Image (cartoon, helix red, strand yellow):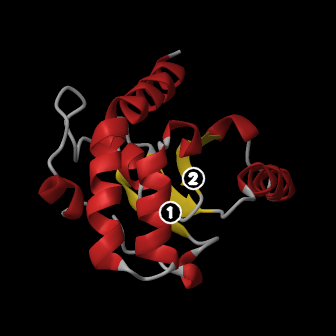
Amino acid sequence: MKIVYHCYGGSHSSVTAAAIHLGYLASDKKPTPHTLMEIPFFDKQTDKDHGKFKFMGRDELGNEVYICGCRGLGKKVEKSLQGIAKIIDTPLDDIIYVDTLKGVNFLMRIGGFLSRRLRLVRLGRPIVLKGTVTAFNNFVNMVEEVKNKLQN
């Protein structure tokens, strides 16, 4: 099974959800900003990375976990990938797509825009870190939904 967590830029919400899924972040304890910065790809993606799938690791069941920044095309990317899966004869049930944008709060949007889009990292990073810590339980809930699907 492959799990793809996707968001706008592939730097914050998808990375956080994937890190929770893989156990890089404990789901029962909000991370510190320092801990978030230690996660691979957190606040590091650039425009040239959008649309690229980054492998984050394998979970405890051997499922592959990926992240992707899709800009505003998340649902269209999902449809395209489903079409490609049909072409290469891969069962659609073998891929789970998770749009993590639904868990993003205002601070994450502003901080991410400043840090990644405008490259004002010193200004945006503290804001996006605070927003991610605040929204952390949203991502925990998303990951729990995915893991429940995997067990059924």
For badge 2, the amino acid type reads: His
Q: In this view, does 108 lie to the left or right of 20?
A: right
The residue carrying mark 2 is: 6
Callout 1 amino acid: Gly
Instruction: Label 2: state its secondary structure.
Output: strand
Residue 99: percent from the left, percent from the top?
Answer: 61, 43
Q: Which residue is drawn at 43% across and 52% down?
A: 108
Q: Are marks 1 and 2 in contact (CB under 8 Å)?
A: yes
User: Is disc 1 surrounded by few (<14), some (14 to 19) or many (20+) residues within 10 Å?
Assistant: many
Q: Quadrant of the N terminus?
A: top right
Residue 106: image x %, image y %? 48, 46
- In the image: residue 60, left or right of residue 70: left
Nearest to the observer: residue 45 or residue 90: 45
Could you classify mark 2 by the number of other residues whose Cα lies within 10 Å: few (under 14), some (14-19), or many (20 or more)?
A: many
Horizontal and vertical percent position of residue 84: 81, 59
Do we see residue 60 in this rendering?
no
Can residue 32 be seen here? The reply is yes
Q: Distance between the residues labelled 1 and 2?
A: 6 Å
Which disc is residue 92 wearing? Answer: none
Regarding mark 1 in the picture, which secondary structure is present there? loop
Tell me which residue sits at (49%, 80%) in the image. Answer: 118
* Residue at point 41%, 57% (across, down): 12
From this view, report whether residue 80 is shown above or below residue 92.
below
Image coordinates of residue 111 in percent, x first then y, are: 41, 62
Pointer 1 residue: 10
In front of the other: 126 or 47: 126
Q: Indicate whether 78 appears above or below 91.
A: below
- Which corner quadrant of the image does residue 141 belong to? top left
Q: Left or right: 14 with respect to 85?
A: left
